[in-house]
Amino acid sequence: MMDIIFHHYQNSPFSEKARLIFGFKKLAWKSVVIPPIMPKPDVVALTGGYRRTPIMQIGADIYCDTALIGDVLERIVPNPSLYPRSCAGASRILAQWADSTFFWAAIGHCFQPAGVQNLFSGMPPEQVQGFTADRAKFRGNVPRLSPAEASGQLSEMLTRLEDMLADGRPYLLGEQASVADFSVYHPVWFVRDAAKVGAILERAPKLSAWTERMAAFGHGQAQDLSSTEALAVAREGKTEDLSGRAFIDFHGIPLGTRVAIAPIDYGIDPVEGELVLADANEYAVRRHDERAGTVVVHFPRLGFQLKKLDQ
């Protein structure tokens, strides 16, 4: 198997989700640290414009969004599974809620004065202003919650998650960890370990104990890699064989068509390329970049939209 190359930065919540999945599956991976805000020239060379963090690279394949990254890692290492048979559907639905509604409540809670101070500690004022301006554009169509509103909603969500552990189960949906646990974990991690405003977690002792169990999975075995080296891997690497994948068409857009794919909620920069995959759960486009070479960029269907470009 070609190396797993992971493009991330330390305080990225969704990066922590994927890093913990690496630990869960006991994977070795190459770590490329990227800027938290634009410009990200080496990332854009690989993705064609997609700017969310993280992305995962295997050879000349670029995988966007942690929901899809989880599916790809499951194909590589099926056991232990992120989708146990007893709760496969429920785990995906709970994960989708956690990656959206729960995540944004946690982010709003963290942007109280103490959280802001902790997140930006030691950062020059001009960098703070740059981060704020970047994120204002990045939020796209996501409604804004005041810290007070977010904290109230987060508190109730934590109570409901606490109730899920009331019968003594070790994980949210039973005896085995699932993708739902990793999706719930990363907003909790951001509250507790990045923004350090975790006093709100004290009302959920079972969830706090669950957090420690999750953290114990660790991050697998990471080895540093430069973004320049990652671009060289893409230029020289192969792409996944997609010939056996089903074509599922809801748009009347055949494979080989020039399309644009973009998130529907935030970070909505489109990626243009030749459509080479549209199955039940995934899109992919082939594109060329002078620095990265010919790459295939993959996206999940859920949360993304596909549009035909004028020829």
Image (cartoon, helix red, strand yellow):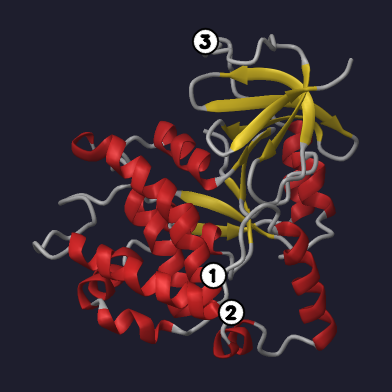
Q: Quadrant of residue 189?
A: bottom left
Classed neighbour count for the residue bearing mark 1: other residues with Cα under 10 Å, few (<14), some (14–19), many (≥20): many
Residue 81, compared with residue 145, is above or below; it is above
Q: Are marks 3 and 1 in contact (CB under 8 Å)?
A: no
Q: Which mark lies nearer to you, 3 or 2?
A: 2
Res 68 seen here: yes
The label number, if any, that marks residue 244 in the structure image: 3
Q: Which mark is residue 107?
A: 1
Label 2 crowding class (10 Å Cα cut-off): few <14, some 14-19, many 20+?
many
Mark 2, secondary structure of its residue: loop
**Residue at image location 77% in from the left, 35% down from the top:** 271
Mark 3 secondary-structure assignment:
loop
Counting from the top left corner in percent of width and height, residue 58 is at 61, 37
Residue at the spot 58% in from the left edge and 15% down from the top edge: 250
Mark 2 = which residue?
Answer: 111
Residue type marked 2: Phe
Q: Position of residue 185 (x, y in %)?
A: 38, 63
Query: Which badge, 3 or 2, is on the more N-terminal residue?
Result: 2
Mark 3 residue type? Gly
Q: Are marks 1 and 2 in contact (CB under 8 Å)?
A: yes
Taking depth in this image into account, of 112 and 299 the one nearest to the observer is 112
Quarter of the C terminus within the rendering: top right
Mark 1: amino acid? Ile
